[in-house]
Image (tube, grey):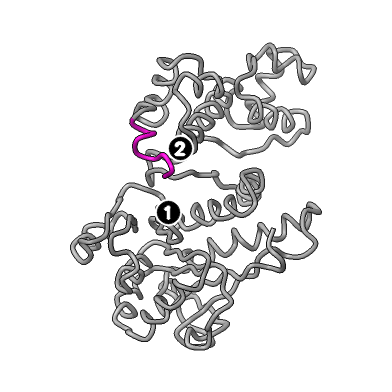
Amino acid sequence: MARGPRRIAMLAFPEVQVLDVMGPLEVFSRTSRWLVDQGRAKQPVYTVEIIGLKHGAFLTSSGLRLHADHAFAEVGGGLDTLLVAGGVGVAKVRTQRPLLAWIRAQAGKVRRLASICTGAFLLAEAGLLKGRRGTTHWNHCEAFARAYPDVALEPDTIFVKDGSIYTSGGVTAGMDLALALVEEDHGREVALAVARELVMFLKRPGGQAQFSAQLSVQLAEQEPLRDLQAYIQDHPSADLSVERLARRVGMSPRNFARRFTEEVGQTPARFVASVRVETARRLLEESSETLEWICEASGLGTPESMRRAFLRTLGIPPGQYRARFQST
């Protein structure tokens, strides 16, 4: 863990999309609070701030006002992660040469540079996406491709990482990206805990709709069932039949199935299936293990049963999923 808090800054401007700004910053802020509350950090691990064209208040596209802590010209170094928001105001600021020059300069200083939604237009206009993979809001992909044909656009992905530069899809995809950055810094357990705090899905790289992670993070209210959910996620290859799970919490199978469904919002079998698919997804993305090994590790059984589960849940077979989304 880094010494002192990491400085997370969001570049925003008049007519910015307010959720592009506040969603990702809330993810980082909530992570800091969770780590301190859990005794895992003595001080906040992140600080968050807004950088604007000028210091002070400005209007967002919704009519709400945000406050810029600093004008961009006042910020030299010291940022850990720079996020660039999107919104209708991008059309005006993408022609401002001093701002684009500042973004280019920051790209050489920060640990990570990321865009939210149509903020990708600013990164592309600054020349930072040339020859790189990237994405943006699905509704603006056609215009983006016309304007920047030298960018390898991936229109159906939630977010794309290419080196130290990240681009994300529309609006709330920025929160998915922020969760992924938290996971890079503090691990999957922390990212999942923050997702639960924010009542979000912990999403991995994938399409904006059909490839979103299927793992529900809704927690049961009662401790035995909540602990059982954690056990299932930690042991996807175990015997997770209703009878065996009911025995772990000291209930009859019928009562257990009823109580679990009431509290979690889905049947035990469906929850187990979603955990196993999510585990297989993660292993396909992050490892080069064989499909047979992943089937065993995830509890999905045979390659054919995994294939059926992927087609039913994600709409594509495991091999195609890995070819498209495996980390490089």
Residue at the left extreme, as displayed: 146
Q: Callout 1: few (<14), some (14-19), or many (20+) C-alpha neighbours within 10 Å? A: some
What residue range appears in magenta?
320-328
Q: Is residue 245 magenta?
A: no
Which residue is drawn at the image coordinates 30% and 73% (left, top)? Answer: 125
Q: Residue 86 appears in which quarter of the rendering?
A: bottom left
Q: Where 245 falls versus 108 (above or below)?
A: above
Which residue is drawn at the image coordinates 51% and 70% (left, top)? Answer: 110
**Amino acid type, label 1:** Lys
Which residue is drawn at the image coordinates 44% and 75% (left, top)? Answer: 60
- Which residue position holds label 1? 161
The circle drawn on residue 285 is 2
Q: Where 72 falls versus 328 (above or below)?
A: below
Q: Quadrant of the N terminus?
A: bottom right
Residue 318 horizontal/vertical position (percent): 39, 27
Which residue is drawn at the image coordinates 60% and 39% (left, top)? Answer: 217
